[in-house]
Amino acid sequence: MSDESRKIDLGTHALRVREAGSGPATVLCLHGFLDGTEVWDAMLPELSGTARVVRVQQRGHGDSTAPAGACSIDDLAADTVALLAALGIERAILVGHALGGLVALKTALRAPERVAGLVLVEAFSEIDVRASEHWRHVVRAGEVNKLQGLARSVYGPTSRRSVDGDGIALTEIARAHQQLASAPATAELSAIGCPAVVLAGESDVPGSAAARSLAGVIPGARLELVPGVGAAPHVDAPGSVAAAVRSLLGS
């Protein structure tokens, strides 16, 4: 399957996108915090010949740029709407992991005419006190040590994993996570009008709980817990995510 990579200028910043496949429908994939488009690669063969699959590198990640200043989840949703317009995509199924799932939800609220369906992988719309404290730590680490601080605060102090991107912009996105403690998005979700599949790894207890919560407030949402899988079913069980996408393509 051919894979085209390019940057799309949104005026104040530009986002890297990768496109593969073809078909009558479009699937747009949004990764989680500190991830990149490669997390969707294992799913591509499952959708070969079924749909055009666009993977977005969200602002501040990799070589996607970001405007200066604060960044909210609504700003990331605005990026998605602008990107759909720039690519000439009238409607798409949005697939989002974690942060990407929340961005997909906000996009569906902001521009419902653009969203044909949602596949929400390990997504959330609010955080508890413990998670708020975690994100406070991530923000502080990013403020002090930028990319290195973000990597250590998310992956652990002894991890050798590195982070590629704009450390200041990513810190602002971490701050947007923390703000979910005082400004959750859950109450808005009853306005979602498109079909939705909420998916989580069964072995991920917090993720499964968040998935049940989302499925309970999004009208008509279908909950799917993937057995034997943790917090990354899109990586460890890509067929489960592809199957959810195909179920919406047929709806």
Image (cartoon, rainbow, N blue to C red):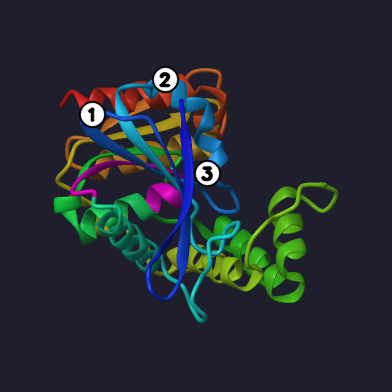
Against 194, residue 224 (above or below) is: above
Picture disc at residue 46: 2
Q: What element carries label 1?
A: helix
Against 25, residue 125 (above or below) is: below
Q: In which quarter of the image is the C terminus?
A: top left
Mark-to-mark CA distance, 1 and 2? 14 Å
The residue drawn where x is 52% and y is 40% is 206
Instruction: Mark 1 vs mark 2: give the one in front.
Output: 2
Could you tell me the amino acid type at mark 3?
Thr
List x then y, in percent, for residue 108.
Answer: 24, 52
Reading the chain from its start, which is encountered first: label 1 or label 2? 2
The residue drawn where x is 52% and y is 80% is 68
For label 3, the residue is 37
The answer to if 156 sits in the magenta stretch is: no
Q: Using a 10 Å C-alpha cutoff, classify the residue at mark 3 as few (fewer than 14 neighbours), some (14 to 19) or many (20 or more).
A: many
Q: Is mark 2 on a helix, strand or loop?
A: helix
Could you tell me the amino acid type at mark 2?
Glu
Pick whichever, 142 or 61, lies toward us: 61
The residue drawn where x is 55% and y is 33% is 232
List x then y, in percent, for residue 23.
Answer: 26, 28
Which contiguous range is marked in magenta? Answer: 89-102
Reading the chain from its start, which is encountered first: label 1 or label 3? 3
